[in-house]
């Protein structure tokens, strides 16, 4: 399988099945590129607030949850949920307010507990909001 350039796709005989699949692939790549551009604009415009002790969780918060002695860090961002970033040796998962976890974090404070997903799982304790 040889991947074609945009120019080769443009020059293609559009009636063939091969060119139709190339066009489908190109359209999908274009949508992904647009999503990435929109995410970059959203993060460039994001003013990350400073969270005082006891402040409610909001967009831009870095939240640490503890469950069974294990800490997991999440960044509540405007887009691109599911991306994992590594900062100073720490893994941080991006969640959005549209995700179930993001929705449950909004408005909570350090020291509060969240119900854990799954049966018989202990709650997750919010240990830090920065």
Image (cartoon, rainbow, N blue to C red):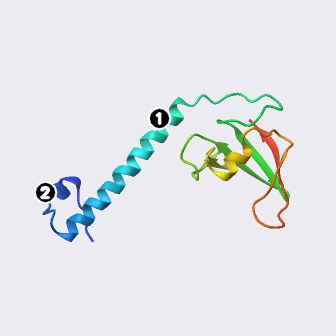
* Residue 3 seen in the current view: no
Q: Is label 2 in a helix, a strand or a loop?
A: loop
Residue 42 in picture, x, y percent from top left: 51, 35
Q: Name the residue under label 2.
A: 11
Work out whether residue 40 or residue 59 is closer to the camera in this orientation and state it: 59
Residue at point 72%, 40% (across, down): 106
Left or right of 28? Residue 100 is: right
Quarter of the picture holding the C terminus: top right
Sort mark 1 into few (<14), some (14-19) or many (20+) by Cα contacts within 10 Å: few
User: Residue visible at 57% across and 51% down?
Assistant: 83
Q: Is residue 22 above or below residue 34?
A: below
Tell me the CA gap for discs 2 and 1.
33 Å
Label 1 secondary element: helix
Where is residue 19 drawn, in percent x and y?
A: 20, 65
> Would residue 90 appear left or right of 28 to someone viewing this image?
right
Describe residue 13's horizontal placement relative to residue 54 as left or right.
Answer: left
Q: Which residue does the image show at 31% across and 60% down from the upper left?
A: 25
Image mark count: 2
The residue tagged 1 is: 41
Q: Do the residues labelled 2 and 1 touch (CB within 8 Å)?
A: no
Where is residue 46 shown, x and y percent of the image? Answer: 57, 31
Whether residue 45 is situated above or below residue 65 in the rendered picture:
above
Residue 70 at x, y percent in the picture: 80, 56
Residue found at x 57% / y 40%: 78
The local crowd at label 2, few if under 14, some if 14 to 19, many if 20 or more residues have their Cα within 10 Å, is few
104 up-or-down from 52: above or below: below
Q: Is residue 38 visible?
A: yes
Q: Quadrant of the N terminus?
A: bottom left
Who is closer to the viewer here, 51 or 109? 109
Question: In terms of sequence position, does the residue under pointer 2 or pointer 1 come before the other?
Answer: 2
Position of residue 11 relative to residue 33, above or below, is below
Give residue 91's mark: none
């Amino acid at each position: 399988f040889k991947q074609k350039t945009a120019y080769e796709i443009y020059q293609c005989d559009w009636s063939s099945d091969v060119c139709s699949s190339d066009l489908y692939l190109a359209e999908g790549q274009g949508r992904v590129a647009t999503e990435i551009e929109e995410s970059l604009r959203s993060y460039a415009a994001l003013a990350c607030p400073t969270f005082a002790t006891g402040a409610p969780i909001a967009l831009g918060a870095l939240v640490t949850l503890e469950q069974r002695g294990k800490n997991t860090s999440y960044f509540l961002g405007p887009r691109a949920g599911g991306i994992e970033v590594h900062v100073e040796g720490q893994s941080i998962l991006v969640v959005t307010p549209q995700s179930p976890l993001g929705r449950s974090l909004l408005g909570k404070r350090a020291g509060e507990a969240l119900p854990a997903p799954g049966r018989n799982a202990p709650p997750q304790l919010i240990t830090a909001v920065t």
